[in-house]
Amino acid sequence: DSGVTQTPKHLITATGQRVTLRCSPRSGDLSVYWYQQSLDQGLQFLIQYYNGEERAKGNILERFSAQQFPDLHSELNLSSLELGDSALYFCASSVGVQSEAFFGQGTRLTVV
Amino acid sequence: AQSVAQPEDQVNVAEGNPLTVKCTYSVSGNPYLFWYVQYPNRGLQFLLKYITGDNLVKGSYGFEAEFNKSQTSFHLKKPSALVSDSALYFCAVRDMETGGFKTIFGAGTRLFVKA
């Protein structure tokens, strides 16, 4: 158990809908990262927050947004969902930039 | 831009034999390098990291990695492979140009260890 909790584990939704993925980082970790893992594109960095502030952005679509709350949990919002958004979404957390990241079990999103 | 490459999609090795999973990187400054392993239907697990110091880094489950600055490589090694080592392995580099907050992953290398 990495100490990073992601909910829900599985999500099936229709095209055009909006979903929210939730992540609780390890106790004491201030950084939260979001990644998308799909079969054809590997592990893609989406966005990173540090103590509530956005610090780095990757290939995140405009339809996607995220935030980190004062209690350090984070949410990834995906809207106007398309079939191609089906993937495994991982959250990870770390203490700081020199520290390894600990990954949650992921949320498997299926858009039908 | 910083990048990391894993030139092999798949590595096959017999149980008991040494294994190597290759990784090369490109960074503008000093690299922060990591190896992670992913088992089926699981999140990534941290194996080892290189920040500074000795070029040979030891990690979990008997794995080690050698940092080679001149060849910009960080290959993962294990002296004697186990069937249970079969998994997907990711090399990653932390992008210090953005303050170290962005970690870039390689495409992954699938390791098959045959009994």
Image (cartoon, rainbow, N blue to C red):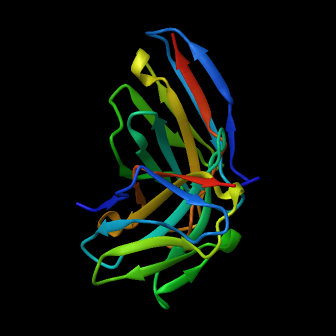
Residue A81, visible in the rendered structure: no
Q: Image check: B66 left or right of B115?
A: left
* Image height of B17 relative to A54, above or below: below
User: Residue B41 at what x, y percent from top left?
Assistant: 66, 38
Q: Nearer the viewer, residue B87 or A68?
A: B87
Q: Image check: B57 left or right of B104?
A: right
Q: Residue at x 45, y 33 (%)?
A: A39
* Image height of A45 relative to A39, above or below: below
Q: Nearer the viewer, residue A90 or B92?
A: B92
Total number of numbered discs in the rendering:
0
User: Residue B111 at what x, y percent from top left?
Assistant: 55, 54
User: Residue A41 at what x, y percent from top left?
Assistant: 38, 37
Q: Residue at x 63, y 46 (%)?
A: B43
Dividing the picture into quadrants, the one containing residue B82 is bottom right
* Image height of A88 relative to A86, above or below: below
Q: Residue at x 41, y 30 (%)?
A: A64
